[in-house]
Image (tube, rainbow, N blue to C red):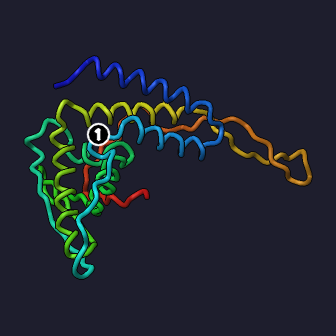
Amino acid sequence: MFSRERFQQLLRRSEELIDVLSGYRNPALRSVAMERLISEEFLPELFKRIPQPPIPWGYFIRRQARMTIMTNVYPFNVASRIIGPAGSTIRAMSRYSGCRLVLSSVAQSVLNIDIISEDFQGVVDWRIGKAIEAIQYVVKDENCEVSLNQLAEQAVRRGCRTFPRMMPQPNRRNFAGANECRIVVENENTDEETEYTAKSFDSSDGE
């Protein structure tokens, strides 16, 4: 059930994180800090602990399974929900299961998710089962946990895009070509949400 109180709590926490991140002048350090804080604050509960696989046995093999979701029965974009802001949710699912997840749309209202596991014979099926569990957890979204966390995460990412960043600029007054810094604001589309259509999306993208 949607909780307005929980939504307001996450919104306030997002604003607090944006204030913290505004103290980072170096964009690279800010990006690292942002990903760490997002993972600590907004990672769905299931993915906060990586499960331990069973004792391995047999040969090291590669196994692939496919999960098909009819998206027209859901009142939201299923691909976007699974992928998450900047691909964070699908990467969390991949870490949780130890599987590579590849999304593809071959027809309208049909989303295929290929689950690829590479491990010992006694572990590959367990990993595929964990991947299916993770997908079902995200799509079912009990108590709106996943969707609310994604909204809060997106608010932080948008807020960070508006920060000024230090850009080295050549100092033409100096023959040696020493650099000076000036403040510029990144010009990104902060008013529009990226919506993934999942023609093809791999959980390893962006890693």
Residue drawn at (73%, 46%), measured in percent from left and top? 168
Q: Secondary structure at mark 1?
A: helix
Residue drawn at x 41%, y 31% as measured from the top left: 155
Check the picture and name the quadrant holding the N terminus.
top left
Residue situated in front as seen by the camera: 147 or 47: 47
Which residue lies most toward the front here?
Answer: 55
Q: How far across and how far down the image is residue 36, in percent? A: 48, 43
Indicate the amino acid at tag 1. Glu
Residue located farthest toward the right when viewing the structure as drawn: 175
Q: Position of residue 32 (x, y in %)?
A: 53, 46
Q: Position of residue 132 (x, y in %)?
A: 17, 55
Q: Is residue 94 above or below residue 17?
A: below
Tell me the residue that label 1 is attached to.
Answer: 45
Q: Quadrant of residue 181?
A: top right
Q: Residue 19: x and y, percent?
A: 54, 26
For residue 142, above or below residue 179: above
In the rendered view of the protein, which quadrant contains the C terminus?
Answer: bottom left
Residue 120 left/right relative to 23: left
* Mark 1 crowd level (few <14, some 14–19, many ≥20, 10 Å Cα): few
Q: Looking at the picture, tell me which residue is in the foreground, 84 or 77.
A: 84
Residue at point 45% right, 36% down?
157
Between 50 and 170, the one lying in front of the other is 50
Q: Where on the picture, by quarter, is residue 73? A: top left
Q: How many marks?
A: 1
Observer-nearest of 98 and 17: 98
76 to the left or right of 93: left
Seen in the image, is 85 located left or right of residue 189? left
